[in-house]
Image (cartoon, rainbow, N blue to C red):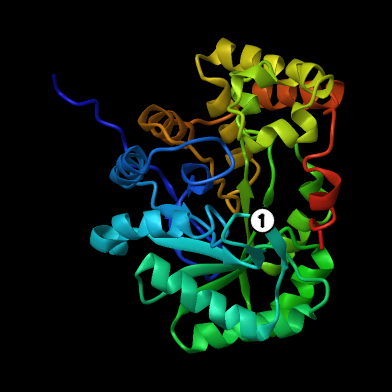
Amino acid sequence: MTPTFIPPVPRRRLGERGPEVSALGLGCMGMSDFYGPADDTQSLHVLHHALDVGMNFLDTADMYGTGANERLLSHLLANRRREVVLATKFGNVRAEDGRLLGINGSPDYVRSACDASLQRLQVDHIDLYYQHRVDRSVPIEDTVGAMAELVRAGKVRYLGLSEASADTIRRAHKVHPITAVQTEYSLWTRDVEDEILPTCRELGIALVPYSPLGRGFLTGAIRDLGQLAASDWRRANPRFQDGNLQANLALADGVAALARERGWTPAQLALAWLLDRGADIVPIPGTRSHERIDENAAAARLRLDDGVRTALARLLAETPVAGERYPAASMAHVNA
C-alpha cells in the first residue's frame, strides 16, 4: 500500500526576530508525566513522525518526569538535532520523587538549571529557554539578566516566559528581548486576550498556547473521570471535577457539532480557531499518537470562514466554563 502523503506543516515566525517554526508545535510533557503511564519507545516513534510531517517545534521542561522528558528527547536529538527548534523550561523545582519543592528564579539557579538541561538533552544549546513560572521573590530583571548571560555564552538562542503577567513581560523585555510567552489558551481558557496577548503584540512577542485542546477535553473524548488513569493529573483539575465536567460538556458538544458540519474533528476546529487568532500564535498540542499528529498537522492547513467564526463566538458567549483551570495552589503562580 502506498503511504498517504501528508503536506508539511506550514511555518510561522516566533516573534519579530525569532526562529521560523511549524505553525503547530508538539508539547512533549504527556510523554513522561501527568497523564498516566506512557511508553518511551512509542513516544520516540511519535516524535520522529512529528518531524517527518514538518512539526519541528518541540516543547519540554526540566520538571516533566523530573528530567525524564528531556532525556527522552535526547534520543531523538542525537540524530535529528538540526531539524528541531528546541524549547525547554526551568523554574519549577522538583524532588527526585516528583514532589514540587517551589519556584526558583535566582541567577545561580538559572545557570545551574540550564547546564543540567543541556546535559540531559545532550545538546550544546537550547533554542528557546523559558522561565516556567515567575519567582515572585526574585526581581524579574535579575532572572532575565541571568538568562541573557546564557545567550551571550551561546548556551541559549532565544528567551521566553511562561504564565507571566503583562507587567512582568514588559519589565523582562527591557532587560533582554523576549521571543515568546507561553500560557494556556484555548476555546475554554481565553483570559490571555485581556492583557497578555495585546502586550505581546505591542512588543513583537509570539504567544505559544499550551493545552490548546483543553487538556484533551475539547476533543469530546472525555465524558467522565472514570476514563482517566488513576495517576492522571486531570482528576485533580477543577474543570474535570464532578458537576464542572458535566457542565463543560456543553462546550465540548457544541464544538463537536460545529466541526461535524464541516467534516473536521473537534480537535481540528479548536486548533484552527487558535491559529486564526493571529499569525503570532503557535499552539503546542501534546499527544502520544501517530494518528493525532496527522490530525493536528491537517488542522494547520484549515481556514475558518466568517460563518464558523460567528458560530464559535456565539457558542463561547452562551456557554460559560465551569471551574478554574488549576487548583488554588497552582493558580497562585499564574499571571505573576
Residue 8 % position (x, y): 33, 41
Q: Residues within 10 Å of mark 1 (few under 14, many from 20)?
A: few
Q: Quadrant of residue 100?
A: bottom right
Q: Residue at x 66, y 38 (%)?
A: 233
Q: Is residue 188 left or right of residue 3?
A: right
User: The residue under label 1 is which amino acid type?
Assistant: Arg
Residue 309 % position (x, y): 69, 27
Q: Residue at x 39, y 52 (%)?
A: 56
Q: Is residue 117 left or right of residue 213?
A: left
In the current view of this chain or complex, which residue is farthest to the left? 1
Residue 28 % position (x, y): 48, 48
Q: Quadrant of residue 170?
A: bottom right
Q: Quadrant of the N terminus?
A: top left
Along the viewing direction, whichever of 192 and 291 lies nearer the viewer: 291
User: Which residue lies under the disc numbered 1?
Assistant: 99
Q: Please, what secondary structure does the residue beneath circle 1 have?
A: loop
Q: Residue at x 51, y 67 (%)?
A: 128
Instruction: Please tell me whether residue 51 is drawn above or below residue 257 in the rendered image.
Output: below
Q: Quadrant of residue 218?
A: top right
